[in-house]
Image (spheres, grey):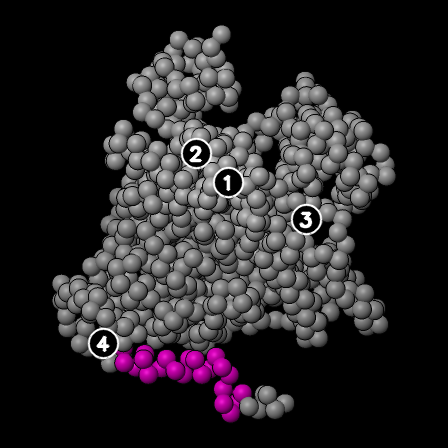
Amino acid sequence: MLGKLARKVFGTPNDRKIKATRPVVAQINALEDEFEKLDDAGLIAKTEEFKKRVADGESLDKLLPEAFANCREAAKRALGLRAYDVQLMGGIFLHQGNISEMKTGEGKTLMATFAAYLNALTGRGVHVVTVNDYLAKRDAEWMSNVYGALGLTTGVVYPRQPDDEKKQAYDADITYATNNELGFDYLRDNMKSELKQMSQRDHYFAIVDEVDSILVDEARTPLIISGPADDRSDLYVSIDKLIPDLSPEHYSVDEKTRNVTFTDEGNDFLEEHLQARGLLPEGQSLYDPESTTIVHHVNQGLRAHVLFTKDKDYIVRDGEVVLIDEFTGRMMAGRRLSEGLHQAIEAKEGCNIQPENVTLASVTFQNYFRLYEKLGGMTGTAATEAEEFAEIYGLGVVEVPTNRPVARIDEDDKVYRTGKEKFEAIVEEVKQAHEKGQPVLVGTTSIEKSEMLSQMLKAADLPHNVLNARQHEQEAQIVADAGKLGGVTIATNMAGRGTDIKLGGNVEFKIMEAIAADPEGDPEAIRARIEEEHTADEQAVKDAGGLFVLATERHESRRIDNQLRGRSGRQGDPGKSSFFLSLEDDLMRIFGSERLDKVLSSLGMKEGEAIIHPWVNKSLERAQAKVEGRNFDIRKQLLKFDDVMNDQRKVIFSQRREIMESEDLSEITQDMRHEVIDELVDIYAPDKSYAEQWDMEGLYGATIEKLGLDIPVMGWADEDGVDQDVIRERLEEASDKLMADKEEAFGSDTMRQIEKQFLLQTIDGKWREHLLTLEHLRSVVGFRGYAQRDPLNEYKTEAFQLFENLLESLREQVTTQLAQVRPMTEEEQRAMMAEMMQQQQAQQAALQQQAAQQAGAEGAETALAGDFEPLIEGFDENDPSTWGNPGRNDACPCGSGKKFKHCHGRLA
Ligand code: ADP
Ligand code: MG
C-alpha cells in the first residue's frame, strides 16, 4: 500500500529517468531553428566540427544536444521524418548504455541513428545489430540516407561477403550486421595469421535491435566453427579392446540418463590396464587433469558397449553404423552421435572409424557482446528480463513512453476445457472479425500449429496467409500487409519481425502493384488515386477496431506474449489483443490446471464455454515468471561454464594479436627458452639436491632434444662450484649463442618471420587441442562419481590446470622448433610451401564448413569447400627422390614422425 502511495508521490525510478532527460530534449528542440537554417553542406561541416571537438577532448555528453539536433535535421531532409521527442529520449538512453524499451512502431530504427551518430564522432565505428540479414540490409539502406546527409559512411555486413568488401563495411562509421555474422567474423578474425586480414577493427559501441531476442532467446546457442579432427582411430580401437575385460563391479549404469560411472575398483583396473597398453603414462592417475581426454573416451567406449545394443539402437549396414529412432524404429541415415560416441560404436563393431568434427573456435553471444566497451539495446519488450540484462550485461532498461497513448484493448484470457473447443472458438472469432473487415493476426507457437489452424480456416472458407519465419524478405512484405481490410494472417511469433503493420496495408506496396497492373496509366494519377483509396481503407480498418491480435497459446515467457500483443496498436492506433487458451496447453498442464479444472467444474461450464477472469491471467503470469526464472538460471549456469573458457580465450586471442602486431618477437622467444631451461634444471637438478643426485644424463638428452644443443653437460656435476644457477647460465648462454648463429645464417628479417610464424601456428594448434579437451572435461565432470563436489568448481580447477599445461607445452614446442630450424635447400622450401598450402586449405575448408547452430529458424547452411587443385608440384611424401636433402635431425619427410636420421636417412 505504502509502496503504491510512494510511487504516486515520487514517481517510479523509471519516471525519474524519463524526467531527467526532459531538459536535454528541450535543449535539442531549442536548437532546431538554428540547424534548420544550415544548408546541406552546413550539416556536414557540423559533423567535421564535432569530430574535431571530440578529438580535442570534449565529452560526448556535452556534445549530445547539438549532435542530436544535427541528426534530427538530417533525417528530416533525407527521410522526411521529424523525430519525435520520445525518439530523442530513446537515443539518449542508448548513448548512456541502456536498453530503450519502446513499443512496436515507435520508430526505433530512426531512434538508433542519434546514438550511433554521436558515438561515431569518435571515429571508432559503431555497430548496429539486427536479427536477420534482411533487416541489416533494409535498415542500412534506409538509414544510410541520414548518415550520408551528415557526412558519415554506412556499411552492411552479410554472410559470404568477399573479404575486401567486408573489411570496408567494418571500416565504415556505422556498420549494420546480424549478431551471427558479427560473432563469426570475430572468430574468423582470430584464426587469421596477419593483422591486415582481420575484418573487425574495434569493439567500441554496439546498439542491439530486438535485444531480448538476441541476448536472451539466442543466448543459449553458441556460435561454433568446426572442422575435422585428426584421425584418432587407433585410440578408439585400443580403448574398445579394453572394455570387454571390465566386469560389472567396475562401473554402474544409469539407464535413465544414459550415463555410466566407474567405481573405485573400475578406476584402479583402468589405470593399470591403460598404463600397460601405453595409453596412460606411468604414474599418471585418471583423476589428473591431463587424463581428461582418455577418461572421456573410456566413458564413451563403455557407453557404446552397455547402453547401445546392435539391431535395437543401431544397425550395421554396408560397414556403417546407422542409428535407429527409438520411437518409430526407422533408420536415421546420416545422423551421428557426437563427442566420439559414434566412433566408439564403430570401433565396437569393427567398422571403419569416420573422422569426427571438432570445434575450432566458439563463442556465446553473451561473451561476444561483452567485448564491447559500451552496449545499448532496443526492443518493445525488455522490462520482464531487466534483472538478467543488469546481471549479465550491466544493461539498464528504461521504458520510454509512447509518442501517443496506447489505445489497444487487451482482453482477459479466455480459457477453454479442451484444445478442440479452443480452436473451434478461434475459428469462429476470426470469422466474425473478418466479416466486419477487421484484420486479424493469429499467433501460434509452432509451424505445425500454424498449419493445423490453416486447415481449419480453409475448411471454414476463410482466406488467409500463413507465415513461419523462414523467408525474411517475402514475409516482411506479407506482414506489412497484414493490416489490410478483412485480412487474416497466421504467423509464428518470429515471422516478419522488425516489420511494422500499418492499418489499411502498406500504401507504397499498393501503389507499386497498381502501377505494375496498369503500365499504360499515368503513374502520378495512379499514385493519387491509390493514396485516396488507402486513406479510406485505413479509416475503414480503424472503424472496424484496428488490428486484432489473436494468440492461440501463452508462451513460456511473458515477454514473447507481449511481443505478439505489441504488433497491434502502433502510434495510438485502435486495436485489440486476446489470448485463447485451453487446459490442454503445455503451460496450463504444467501449472495449476488441476486447480483451474476444479474451478471450472464448480462453475458448471458447458461445452464450448470459456472462463474469463482476471484471476486466471494473474496466476498464469505467476506461472510464467517461474518458468522465466528457471530458464534464466539455466542460462546463468551455462554462462558460468563458458566464462571459464572465455577468460582463457581472451588471453589467447590477445596474445595472438600482440604477436601479429609485433615486429620483433626475439625477446619473447628468448624468455620462453629461458623458462624451458628453468624447467629442465628443476627436473634434472632440483633445488636442495646434491650434485651426486643430479640426473646429468637425463639433462644431456633433454638439451639435445629440447634445445638442439650438444654440449658436454655430463661433466658439469663433477666440477667444483657448479650449482643450479651455473647450469642455468651455461645453458642460457649456449642456447642464446645457437640462436644468434642461426640468426646470422638466416638474416634477421627471416628469423623474425620464422619466430612469428612458429608462435602463431603453435598457439593455434595448442588452443584447438585445448578446446577439445575442455569439451571432454565438461562431460567428464558430469560423469565423475564424486558426490558432494560441485561440477563447476571441479571444471574450473581442472580447466585452469590444463591451461597452465598448455602454456608450458607452448613454450617448449616453440623453443624446440626454433632450435631445430636451419636454412633450407630449395627442395625443402618447396616441400614446406606445399605443406603450408595444405594447411591453409584445410583451414579455409574448416572456415567454410562452419556449422552455425543458428539451425532452426534461420536454416542451417553448411557450405563445403570445393575441390582443390594441387598448387605445388614435385613433393611427394611417398617418393624419397622428391625430398631433396633433408637435415639429419629434421622430421622425416615421409611423415613417420621420426627424425630423418632414424628413419629414411638411417645409415645402413
Ligand atoms: P519499430 O522498430 O520501433 O517497431 P520502425 O523503426 O520499424 O519501428 O518504424 C515504424 C514506422 O514508423 C516506419 O514506417 C517509420 O517510417 C515510421 N516512423 C519512424 N519515426 C517516425 C517519425 N518521427 N515520424 C513519422 N513516422 C515515423
Ligand atoms: Mg524495429
Measured in 3D between alpha carbons, the distance from the residue under mark 4 to the one under mark 3, in whole angstroms, is: 62 Å
Q: Are marks 4 and 2 in contact (CB under 8 Å)?
A: no
Query: Taking 484 as reference, is 411 left or right?
Result: right
N-terminal of the pair, mark 3 or mark 1, is 1
Badge 4 is on which residue? 32
Q: In the image, what residue type sits under mark 3?
A: Val
Q: Residue at x 75, y 31 (%)?
A: 273
| Position of 820 relative to 158 (above/below) | above
Viewer-proximal residue, 540 or 283?
A: 283
SS of the residue at dot 2? helix
Q: Ligand 2: does it lie within 8 Å of the C-beta at label 3?
A: no
Instruction: State the mark number for residue 782.
Output: none
Measured in 3D between alpha carbons, the distance from the residue under mark 3 to the one under mark 2, in whole angstroms, is: 37 Å
Q: Mark 4, mark 2: which one is toward the viewer?
A: 2
Badge 1 is on which residue? 680
| Start-end of magenta stretch | 7-28
Q: Are marks 3 and 1 in contact (CB under 8 Å)?
A: no
Q: Residue at x 63, y 25 (%)?
A: 234
Badge 2 is on which residue? 707
Whether residue 331 is visible: no
N-terminal of the pair, mark 1 or mark 2, is 1
